[in-house]
Each structure stands twice: as C-alpha cells, then as structure tokens.
Amino acid sequence: MVKPIELKNVRKVFNHPMKVWSKIESVKDLSFSMEQGEIIGFVGHNGAGKTTTIKMIMGFIKPTAGEISVFGKKPGDREVKSKIGFLPERPYFYSELTAMEVLKYFGRLSGISSSVLTGKAENVLKKVGLFEDRNRKLASYSKGMLQRIGLAQAIIHDPELVIMDEPMSGLDPIGRKEVKDIIRGLKRDGRSVIFSSHILSDIENLSDRVLIIEHGKLKSFGSLHEIIRPEDVRYSIEFSCDKSMKDAVFALFDGVRIVSDRFVLDCADISDFNSKLAEVVGKGYTVLNAAGSYPSLEEIVFKEIREEENGQR
C-alpha cells in the first residue's frame, strides 16, 4: 500500500539571512514514514525543524537533499494536493469575508459541486463550533475562532491526509477538546493526520506514534511505549503490615518510606523490583500495589532536549 508520507534522508539548508557566506542546516538526514489512518504527533522546540519539514511535505519548499513522497508522488503534484488538507500555524483570511463565504471559496477551489457545497460548509462549521457565527465577518473573530475556520477550510473537501501546524494554538480548553474530537473523527473515517503542537498532553492523548525532532535530527519515533527506554521506567512497591513490624521493615529495606499509612519502596530497575517484591512477599507483608510507572511525553521530550544540549557542549 502506498504510504501517505515517506521521507528518506531529507536535508534542508538555508542561506544565513545576515551572513551571506554562512549556511543554516534546518533539517538533517530526516527519515520516517506514515501509515494510512494513523495520527502522528510532531514534537520539537521552536526552531527544531518542524515547520520546515511540514513545508517540504506540502511542496512549498524543496529539500536540499533526500526524497519526499506523498501518496507515492512528489510533493506539489496536482493529484496529491487534492488529497491533502492543510492548516498552517498562522492562518490568514480576508477579514471582510464571512465564515460561510470563506468555506464556499475554498470548497470551489477544491472542486466541490455547487449543489452540495452549502450543505457541506454548514456541516463543517457545525463540527468546528462556528455555525451560529457563520454570517459574521472574520474581522470580528477572535484568534481562537480564526483557528477554527482554518481547520474548517482544511477539511471541507474530505481530504485523505490532514496536516496541521499547531492546530490548537489560541484555543481555550473547550475549543481544544472540540479540535481533538475532530482529529479523532478523522481517524475513525480512515483519514491520516500529522500535527505539531507545543501542548504535549494533547499529542500524548491523540497520537498513535510520536515524532520527536531536535535541531533538525530525528530523536525518537514510535508509540509512547516504544520510545520509552527501560531505564526511564520507575518501579515501586506499596505494601502494608502490622504496626508492630514497622521497625523491622525499616531495618530490612533502605529508602523505604511511609505514605498514607502504607510502605512505599522505590526500586532501581526491573531486577531490583523483582528481588524486593520477592522479599516483601516472603516476609508475609500485604502487597497493595507493585508496578512500573511510565514517564509522560513531557518528561521524555525534556530529557531528550537536555541530552541534546549536553551533547553539544
């Protein structure tokens, strides 16, 4: 099956805006591919290369080296463009148009028949929560409302692939929930979605796989469980016993602590966890909980950034 997106050893170099003899390497040997019907969350700090990568996938700029294919063809191919919906980081529209006029305009550009265009536009506006404001001029819209009309134009033509750069920027919690529901709905319909966001909890909740890029290089790519390293998993054992055995517990285990009338024992790794759990059970203590806790996406990303910065010093 042809993949919606595939990058092989992609590199992008720009001329330095101030130093004509200098170059800026924005993307460095980036390779990844996307499966049909999956959601990929794109993570990286400002300047990491996310937007540059998205622009190359869209065909707005060409890579300096490497190959990019979208549905098996080069970015910018007319047939490919008809399959893509795109929401830029800072969408801009003519402020004197109404939301309905904007959607009809983009719908006609996408080849939607006039006989069904009004109905499709109304349905999409309902999805993004703008139906009641459909006849207001965009000049009166808030930043969050403009973000929603940007999302609406990206999906008006039922694209197979939706690419979003910071789709939840400027939205309040209710607006973010609505956008997340739309993204999940796209997946249920078999659409593929790749989106960048600085709100890591949103990426963690939505994504099938997470793409972490730092300084233009791929740091991690996979499901959260795939990109979590074994040494990042924290193991602990919670247990209880008779109060008369309290001193014996403290004598047996270094570092044990009491939390809410239960003993909590942290373990260095899985081997230490298994050994200490066997001791707890062997002593006849009551095990209340024994498991590994996984780091959040935020913890993973910040650790990647710190390691990248330390490696460059």
Image: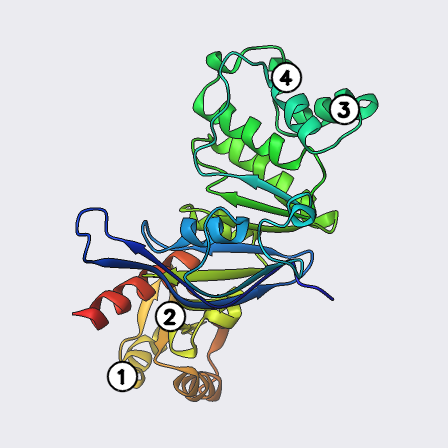
Q: Earlier in the sequence, mark 1 or mark 2?
A: 1
* Residue drawn at x 40%, y 61% as measured from the top left: 213
Quadrant, the C terminus: bottom left
Tell me the tag on residue 263.
Answer: 2
Spatial separation of the CA atoms under disc 4 and disc 1:
75 Å
For the question of whether residue 296 can be seen, the reply is no
Q: Quadrant of residue 89?
A: top left
Instruction: Say above or below: 182 vs 56.
Output: above
Tell me the tag on residue 75.
Answer: none
Instruction: Say above or below: 256 vs 153.
Output: below
Q: Contact, CB < 8 Å: mark 4 with mark 2?
A: no
Quadrant, the N terminus: bottom right
Residue wearing tag 3: 117
Instruction: Say above or below: 215 vs 120.
Output: below
Nearest to viewer (mark 3 / mark 2): 3
Query: In the structure shown, which secondary structural element does the residue marked by tag 4 occupy?
Result: helix
Report the amino acid beneath label 4: Glu
Report the amino acid beneath label 2: Phe
Q: Nearer the viewer, residue 148 or 237?
A: 148
